[in-house]
Image (spheres, helix red, strand yellow):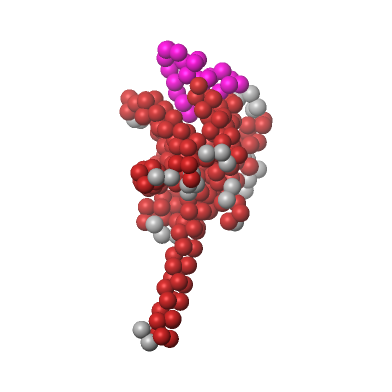
Amino acid sequence: MRKITRGAPYFYGAAIAAFGIIQLVTQNFLSALLPVPPTLPLRGVLMVLSSAVFILAGLCIILGIRRQLALVAVGTLLAIFLLALQLPILLINVHNGGNWAVVFEGVMLTSGAFIIAAGIPDEALISRRWGRTIHLLAMISHYLFALSLFVFCIQHIMYFDYILSLIPSWMPVRMVLGYVVVVAYLLCGISFIMGQRVGLAATWLGIMFFLWVLLLHAPRAIGQWNVETEWTSLFVALAVGGVAFSIARRDHGRLARAVALQADNGCIETVQLREGV
């Protein structure tokens, strides 16, 4: 499983690069994720520039070239979209469930960039202030990611019948699967907030999103290959799965360091006892 979690940056980077490619192919912003008004000045130029950032940053993340800087750039761009576009639209119409989904998908993607960045130090950028800033952003992002899980838990309850309609008809016990997703969101959110069993929760969350990619989104996207929203949803799920695996990897690393520290302390105490200290 740890081999899979090591691929977290690659999954996220591939999804980000795909966002840029989709925009260039469709010559439009991601309609299901980036609701940019058609009247916005220089809209076409901004679309090309954002696509270039997505593609270049995604490639840097995949190829291991200044990964942390690329992730911070992506997180900053997504935060701008979130604060300038997605959040104002939600505040205008808070009763629209679709707006809530768009905003908190944006929160997941934005927070995910900083969470992954904190786990990939860049020697060229190492400084005390930079490191503190990245880790502060990652800590805030961790709780924002958990908040998103609670929001999607509530949305799955409110729109349960719609969620069931998205589950392929060939799957058995569809209603049970729907409830499993609700419980998974709730338990993972609680785990992240409480700081208990974070690695286990994040691993299963990542597995759930990857199963959605393979069993739900990929068949829908391939079956409707010219529908942009299906491809966008696929790569959002891939990116969020990558973020979940990154959280799992960080927690596993934290636990490994704690065990190593305990072992070192035990060895020191043993030596002191033998020497009569």
Q: Is residue 184 left or right of residue 238?
A: left
- Comparing 261 with 76, the one in front is 261
- Comparing 57 with 28, the one in front is 57
- Comparing 208 with 168, the one in front is 208
**Residue shown at the point (45%, 76%) measured from the top left:** 267
Q: Quadrant of residue 16?
A: top right
Can residue 140 be seen at all in this image of the molecule? no
Q: Is residue 218 left or right of residue 233?
A: right
What are the residue bounds of the magenta stretch? 23-48
Q: Position of residue 94 (x, y in %)?
A: 34, 30
**Residue shown at the point (36%, 29%) measured from the top left:** 83
Q: Position of residue 197 (x, y in %)?
A: 45, 60
**Residue shown at the point (39%, 57%) measured from the top left:** 195
191 versus 49 height, above or below = below
**Residue shown at the point (52%, 40%) measured from the top left:** 67
Quarter holding the C terminus is bottom left
Quarter holding the N terminus is bottom right
